[in-house]
Amino acid sequence: MIDLNNIYDEKTFNSSVLSFGNFDGLHLGHKAIFDKLTNLSTKYNLKSVIVTFRPNTKKVINNLQSFDTLISFDLKKELLKKFGIDVICEINFDKKFSNISHTSFMELIIKKYNPKHIVLGYDNRFGKNGLGSYDFLINSGKYKHIKFYKINPFKIDDVLVKTSNIKSLIKRNNISLANKHLGRKFAVKGKVVKGEKIARTLGFPTANIDIEPKEQLIPSNGVYSVNLKIDKTKYSSICNIGSKPTFGSYDRMIEVHILNSNLDIYKKNVFIEFNYFIRKEIKFKDKNELAFQIRKDIKLITNKEKNSVK
């Protein structure tokens, strides 16, 4: 996969099939766009191109100090490669770029990528004030040399699959349904950092995870079944998100205990894949009561894993 980060550079393409958007989450609705794109790429023997934005356009347009995303850009690139996308271009979306008109944006796209086919989501809006749309493109008369495709809304059990709905599910601890809408496990990227080793005194050594980049959405406080992905290997694990109320008042943190392993993963870059929510974070009367509950949580995970392979 070719990875570009400057739409203004001199590199151009003879022709392509293309889509553009934030694609926050790469959920099943987005996957329908990519499937159409790669099918066209194969049919017409053209490079498939995704143009995306960083940071998310909503953060800049709405002057937000922070904006939680469903996916890190590293994971987005990894998944797009798996989906068969040939080229990804990341546009630095700042105030200056947000003021580009929809017609000027199309001029940039055409000049650089010369798309013969453009695939858009049903709700895609682009250009200053969101004046660009699928309807604008097919009705303007300026782009008759390009064929446009609109992907219809994707639903699961009559519920629309969209980023805002998935974020709401994650915040409400409904990880299982969020994963169903994503078509994969919800995951966050981070790095293992030094902790106070309190959990080690309970017999459950944990890795403290510093989330990088910071704008990734973090699930609500509680205990989760997760897979900790290190390099290309996944380890069944249990994760606690919270402030350790049993031991006093701490900053919110993410801790992961790998089941049946004593790996030294300090300073490792990791992905935490969330399987399902187990329970809310609780303040226990003492560390013995907490340790007893952790053993119950781990047993629940191992029993589910045993049942899933039967």
Image (spheres, grey):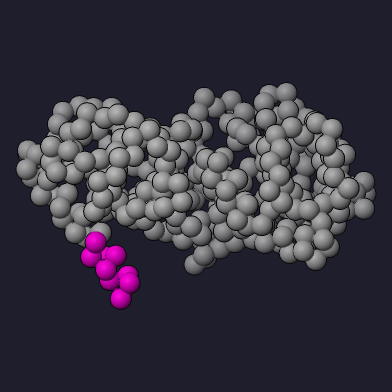
From this view, report whether residue 23 is shown above or below residue 84: above
Residue 139 appears at what percent x and percent y? 87, 51
Q: Is residue 107 above or below residue 141?
A: above
Q: Is residue 30 magenta?
A: no
The dominant secondary structure in magenta is: helix
Q: Is residue 194 above or below residue 222?
A: above
Q: Quadrant of residue 130?
A: top right
113 sits to left or right of 303: right
| Closer to us: 278 or 81 | 81
Q: Give the image location of residue 274, x and y in percent.
A: 38, 51
Q: Nearer the viewer, residue 153 or 204?
A: 204
Q: How many marks?
A: 0
Residue found at x 39% / y 58%: 176
Residue at image x 82%, y 47%?
136
Q: Nearer the viewer, residue 309 or 166?
A: 309
Q: Tell me where residue 79 appears, x and y as whole percent.
A: 57, 51
Residue occupying image coordinates x 68% and y 48%: 1
Identify the residue shown where x is 68% and y is 24%: 95
Q: Is residue 154 visible?
A: yes
Q: Specify start and end residues of the magenta stretch as a single range.
A: 302-310
